[in-house]
Image (cartoon, helix red, strand yellow):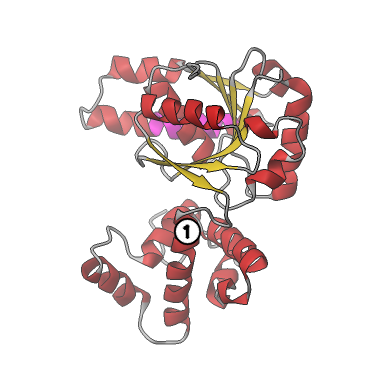
Amino acid sequence: MITEINRIVVIGSGTMGSGIALVFAQAKIDVVLVDVEQKYLDEGIERIKKFLNRSVEKEKITLQESNEIIKRVILSTNLEEAIKDVQLVIEAIIENEGAKKELFKELDSFCSDEVIFASNTSALSISNLADVTKRPSKFLGMHFFNPPQLMKLVEIIKGEKTSESVVENIVALCTRIGKIAVPSNEAPGFIVNRLLWPFLNEAYKLFENGVSDKEFIDTAIKLGLNHPMGPFELSDYIGLDVLLDIGKYLEEQLGVSYKPAKILSKLVNEGKLGKKTKEGFYIYDK
């Protein structure tokens, strides 16, 4: 039996968390956006407002519609208060297994047994995250893509003990908010990142080894494979730190052939993370 989900909390107000909250607000569903400090919430709501302002300028929505969407996003730094009477909690914090497990342990102690837990992790084991809770049957991956408000896909990742009825409920919710849900059994990197990482990493190695310049590689992929962005453009858009975390995890799980190229580690160590820091493989306007 499919239960309509209307009470949702998103934890983490970064690029992904604020984008996920916006998706629900656009679908006329109230959502509580939670973070540890007000300044992070302020940054998250500013990202939402910036996107909506552009939509108003392009006449995709009216100013009144924009204001109504913003009102549906409730900000909170009080986790225990935010999750009262919730049906679904979506975790969108940093891609660190330890940090995620600590959060889910805390949530498990606060939430009733009926609450569904979802992680927006891009590669980590859902079963391992679920194991720290008493609700592995109500735990799954709900992997949105950046930017969530524009990208249609949501990977639905089933852990070893995830209930089929929970999957059905989340797939129905995705349909309701205008997304296309693709269920997958658990595997390192799931579907998209499992295929994307070797492609990107080989592009880094081509550049690193002097086979061709990054601009030429991007052009070749866009024209030769009809991709909207080349691998270096896409990497800067995703975030080089995020990709390095994915690469390290896949190397750990699947072997040395997945080891990140040296140039990616170098850029991340220098704090050049892509568009969000105004420099990655490319330099962006300040």
Question: What secondary structure do most residues of the magenta stretch adopt?
Answer: helix
Residue 174's place in the image compared with 226, above or below, is above
Of 259 and 207, the residue lying toward us: 259
Task: Identify the residue shown where x is 65% and y is 64%.
Answer: 253
The location of residue 141, given as percent across then percent down, is 56, 40
Residue position for label 1? 274
Q: Quadrant of residue 188?
A: bottom right
The location of residue 184, given as percent across then percent down, is 49, 46
Residue 66's place in the image compared with 103, above or below, is above
Of 163 and 31, the residue lying toward us: 163
Q: Quadrant of residue 267?
A: bottom right
Task: Identify the residue shown where x is 30% and y is 33%.
Answer: 54
Q: Mark 1 Cα within 10 Å, few/some/many (few <14, many 20+)?
A: many
Residue 48 among those drawn in magenta: yes
Of 89 and 231, the residue lying toward us: 89
Residue 185's place in the image compared with 163, above or below, is below
Element under disc 1: loop
Residue 121 among those drawn in magenta: no
Task: Identify the residue shown where x is 71% and y is 20%.
Answer: 113
Task: Identify the residue shown where x is 53% and y is 34%.
Answer: 43
The location of residue 108, given as percent across then percent down, is 75, 27
Residue 72's place in the image compared with 139, above or below, is above
Instruction: Give the magenta range.
Output: 41-50
Callout 1 amino acid: Gly
The location of residue 259, given as percent across then percent down, is 59, 73
The mark total stands at 1
In the image: residue 62, left or right of residue 268: left
Which residue is situated farthest in the bottom direction here?
Answer: 210
